[in-house]
Amino acid sequence: MSGTTIIEVRTSPHLHGPMTVETIMRHVIYALLPIAAFFSWHFGLSAALLLAVTTAGCVLAEHTACRLSGKRSTVNDYSAAITGLLLGLTLPPGLPLWMAVVGCLVAILPGKLLFGGLGSNVFNPALVGRAFLQAAFPVAVTNYTPGLAANRFVEFIPSTWAVPLMKPAPLNDWLAKVAVDGFTGATPLAMQKFDHIYSELGPLLWGLGPGSLPGCLILLCGAYLVARGMMDWRITASMIAGAAATGGIFHLVNPALYPDPVWVVFTGGLLLGATFMATDPVASPVTPRGMWIYGLLMGVLTVLIRNLGGLPEGVMYAILFGNALSPLIDRLTPPRPYGARKAQVPQ
Amino acid sequence: MKETAPNPFINGLWRQNPTFVQILGMCPTLAITNSVQNAIAMGLATAFVLICSNGLIAAIRKHVPKQVRIATYIAIIATAVTVTDYLVKAISISVYKALGPFIPLIVANCLVLERAEGFAAKKPVIPSMMDGAGMGLGFAFGLTCLGTVREVLGAGTFLGIHLFGPNFEPWVLFLLPPGGFISLAIWLLIFASYRERKDRRERARAALLTVQPAEAQS
């Protein structure tokens, strides 16, 4: 013993959890894989290719942008892959691939890296890309093709291979050949809103309607993440509760015009948004009370946009709005320091 | 340190470009750049107003009491704008209709008043008109840059000529107001990164010049 001991003095935090960002992100991908597999099985080759292109596009965009700006590539934290998968899942399966690539670039460059990359993004990047596509190509992004087409594993939906910058070819010939019964080119939500036709609830639960994913599968995958302690259930629960409650009020006021709460919850992108996008740990509040407010707000907004706005679906804008408000919500709901009491009125 | 006064024309056109450096006159920049034709017409109209108002204000700069100068400038600018309004109407009624209220609104463009107060009120007539021409054409250049992005992506045309054939899928977003903000941001980013790169090069060269003599001594 020489008698000289080196004592390292470090700043907090002194305790490290076993979970790193990479671990959590990897498990989010595991949770998304069943949904992606279902999407590919339901819509066929085009959907699988779309998911592959969005995922690869986001990862490549992030890698290239990091390298060009002279930083270390940050694709190893898997967050870009999640963005790509989520973006792909929100798009119609027959979307031209060049539009999907545009969506990836918008999601990653201005949506994520311009704010400083993972941990600094104000909005969920996948939804930024999706919102841009919705505003730029409103027709292509809302054109859902029917699922379960007979030859879906053999040939692509023709619009997938549209030449960059060009309109996709009209799908009439392909649709006549596929001939899925009762195809109207609309999602259940659009049909309900514009034509007042209700799709049956059963297929929606198992995700067999056009253009929506199976609610039960999404909830199961979300439950896996909650069980591993990697996701906060409060946001998902409160968003669903907010949407159901608001939908219920609308339904009570006018049952002929507005759907019942269960239908509200299981249609469109509400479950996918509430489970995987609203819970983005960067763009959502950090305090439990804040999470409740944030989720409820987004749920209420979703139904308000659906029922009173011009669009059939409002989840995307509701979540982006919630993202924008989350710093404010954080400021309004500071946690009480240990041992502190409520301010007392001086006597 | 001796510094030569910058040429007022080049100054406005490039070094102090109203759109990309001073970020002035954002209202017409965002509102009417949805086609190249509108952008050029608006830029030229503003340039004409700037030349007239700068020249007149410089000519009477010694006779205007300080307390009422802003009102005087506004009266002169309004006169120039009215002349422009009639001129545009006489030259092309379709352009006049496309620009709508934005020609009369040049009077409220802060760029025009800023050049009156910041340059024409202190300088002789000829440099003031040069400054007006430089700033006006710089503004027209900025608007045309934005208009090009928005028209090419939003409609697939440039000055009404189809670039990609009839099958082009228009990016509707770029004809809508958000498209104005997005393309302005893209151009600002390009110009800012160009300026920063240039600054860095110049600093590196200056550093080299100061270091070398010291190295030579040792």
Image: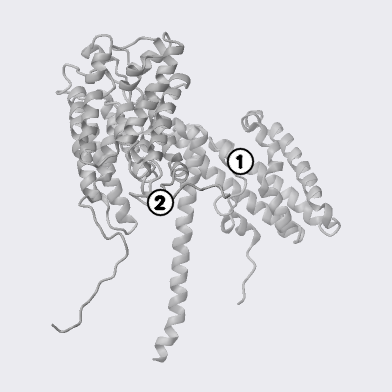
Q: Residue furthest bottom?
A: B218
Q: Quadrant of residue A176?
A: top left
**Residue on which the image places disc 2:** A337
Coloration mode: one colour
In this rendered view, identify the residue nearer to me: A57 or A31: A31
The residue drawn where x is 28% and y is 57% is: A72
Chain of the residue under label 1:
B
Distance from Cα at disc 1 to Cα at disc 2: 48 Å
User: Badge 1 local density, few (<14 within 10 Å), some, or many (20+)?
Assistant: some
Element assignment for label 2:
loop
> For the N terminus of chain A, which image quadrant?
bottom left
In the displayed structure image, the side of residue B74 where residue A133 appears, left or right: left
In this rendered view, identify the residue nearer to me: B50 or A2: A2
Task: Tell me which amino acid carries mark 1.
Answer: Cys
In this rendered view, identify the residue nearer to me: B142 or A91: A91
Element assignment for label 1:
helix
Q: Is residue A331 above or below residue A91?
A: below
Q: Position of residue B132 (x, y in %)?
A: 68, 52
Which dot marks residue B27? Answer: 1
Task: Tell me which amino acid carries mark 2.
Answer: Pro
